[in-house]
Image (tube, helix red, strand yellow):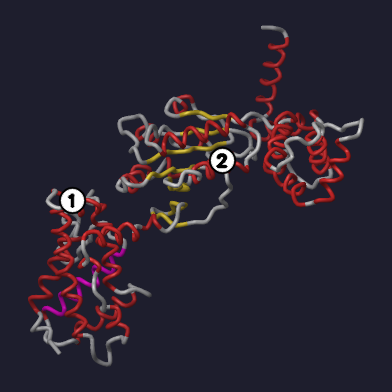
């Protein structure tokens, strides 16, 4: 078995290569290196310490703690696998596209090859550490942690394939941005043909996201409506309808705080297109300075990023001028019937009796009156329509009712009263007074 002294040059070269790859020289201190935007900085510090100790001692004794620490910092993976991920991230942070490694002779190819050779020197140091990993104070898992052969030995085609597969954004199409990190998350994916009514709004969503998908435009989408009309579900599912788009959920606070760093992290991944969704925005509580600066201000939003901002309130004029506004119409008896008719067409009942939509809408209103729903909205109507879809007895009953001479239609007054109550709770009594005054002006022809 080799000694630390025998491998002194190997450890020196490995430590030097590790710093070439990951060290941020502007921020580092001589005795406490701060590594270059690493996802696992503690691991790189521990490995650097292990190389240093192995280089300067004659036995394993002073290396034990550093070696055992490597196991703790790489749970369930080998050290080389984790370092490979750091390597791929390092290339991205240096604005190097791994796909350029297929372009032999190009400047980017030469840079990637330079860093690859340094990584292989680090790997030699890891192999030398494994030879030292024996003794009763060495964690038995150390040898497994230091085992393996790096994928960076593979041909360029294989290396590029693995790098793309290892990209953290390959794990999912939906992420939450929390505390400066992107975390995969699950959402309910609804096919867009399962949305009913609101044809103009739906077409605006489809057109806008299609333009972003084809790199025609990345203008922000500014969506406002009363609660429950579909802002969130439309934003999510029209994004996911396009397979090349990645959806990021971000808190409204991000608009006021670390927006520049947030944008920068996504801008580095030029091969991906990100739709960032800010939901439940309260415009009067947002400091819009960063947004105005980065969207149509002194900075330009990178082409691979698009924002969707959704709110129950109207956006300020100076924000609307930087994007495309979509406003949902109020959900009333007309919109209710449109949704039911769309549903029936999709359910294969397009030629059903013309009164069936009215009967279903009236049944929905009846359930609301019986407190089975707390709101009149598209989302509660969809729940009622699913009941119609799954209950054969209910369908037969309503079909019979649609053929009767006396047809009960949805109560327009009930929709009006509910919407006025909702508007009052959101915007206050003065808003209702303004609406009434506007209605009187229209009636008077002024």
- Residue at the farthest bottom position: 136
The residue labelled by disc 1 is: 103
Left or right of residue 429: residue 4: left
Q: Secondary structure at mark 1?
A: loop
- Identified at 50% across, 46% down, the residue is 240
Mark carried by residue 313: none
Magenta region: which residues? 40-55
Crowding at dot 1, Cα within 10 Å, few <14 / some 14-19 / many 20+, comes out as few
Mark carried by residue 234: 2
Left or right of residue 260: residue 66: left
The answer to which of 30 and 243 lies nearer the viewer is: 243
Crowding at dot 2, Cα within 10 Å, few <14 / some 14-19 / many 20+, comes out as some
- Identified at 67% across, 16% down, the residue is 438
Q: Position of residue 323 (x, y in %)?
A: 44, 29
Q: Secondary structure at mark 2?
A: helix
Q: Is residue 42 magenta?
A: yes
Majority secondary structure of the magenta segment? helix
Q: Compared with residue 106, is residue 17 higher up or lower down, i.e. above or below?
A: below
Q: Position of residue 158 (x, y in %)?
A: 26, 62
């Amino acid at each position: 078995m080799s000694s630390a002294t025998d491998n002194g040059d190997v450890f020196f070269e490995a430590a030097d290569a590790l710093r070439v790859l990951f060290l941020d020289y502007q921020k580092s201190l001589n005795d406490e290196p701060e590594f270059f935007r690493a996802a696992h900085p503690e691991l790189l510090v521990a490995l650097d310490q292990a190389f240093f100790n192995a280089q300067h001692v004659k036995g394993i004794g002073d290396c034990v703690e550093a070696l055992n620490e490597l196991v703790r910092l790489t749970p369930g993976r080998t050290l080389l696998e984790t370092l490979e991920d750091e390597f791929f991230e390092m290339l991205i942070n240096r604005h190097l596209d791994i796909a350029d490694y297929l372009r032999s002779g190009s400047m980017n190819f030469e840079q990637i090859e330079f860093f690859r050779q340094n990584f292989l020197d680090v790997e030699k140091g890891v192999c030398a550490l494994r030879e030292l990993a024996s003794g009763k104070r060495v964690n038995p898992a150390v040898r497994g942690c230091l085992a393996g052969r790096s994928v960076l030995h593979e041909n360029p085609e294989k290396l590029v394939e693995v790098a793309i597969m290892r990209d953290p954004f390959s794990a999912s199409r939906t992420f939450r941005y929390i505390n400066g990190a992107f975390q995969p998350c699950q959402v309910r994916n609804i096919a867009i043909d399962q949305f009913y009514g609101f044809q103009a709004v739906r077409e605006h969503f489809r057109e806008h996201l299609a333009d972003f998908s084809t790199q025609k435009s990345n203008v922000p989408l500014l969506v406002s409506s009363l609660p429950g009309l579909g802002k969130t579900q439309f934003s999510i599912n029209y994004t996911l309808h396009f397979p090349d788009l990645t959806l990021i959920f971000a808190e409204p606070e991000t608009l006021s705080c670390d927006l520049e760093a947030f944008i920068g992290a996504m801008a580095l991944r030029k091969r991906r297109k990100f739709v960032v969704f800010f939901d439940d925005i309260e415009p009067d509580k947002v400091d819009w300075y960063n947004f105005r600066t980065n969207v149509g201000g002194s900075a330009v939003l990178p082409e691979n990023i698009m924002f969707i901002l959704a709110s129950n309130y109207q956006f300020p004029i100076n924000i609307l001028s930087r994007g495309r506004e979509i406003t949902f119409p109020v959900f009333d008896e007309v919109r209710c019937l449109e949704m039911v008719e769309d549903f029936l067409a999709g359910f294969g009942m397009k030629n059903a009796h013309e009164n069936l939509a009215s009967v279903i809408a009236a049944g929905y209103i009846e359930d609301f009156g019986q407190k089975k729903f707390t709101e009149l909205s598209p989302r509660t109507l969809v729940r009622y329509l699913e009941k119609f879809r799954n209950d054969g007895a209910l369908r037969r009953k309503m079909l019979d009712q649609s053929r009767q001479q006396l047809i009960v239609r949805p109560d327009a007054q009930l929709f009006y009263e509910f919407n006025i109550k909702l508007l009052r709770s959101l915007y206050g009594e003065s808003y209702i007074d303004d609406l009434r005054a506007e209605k009187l002006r229209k009636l008077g022809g002024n």
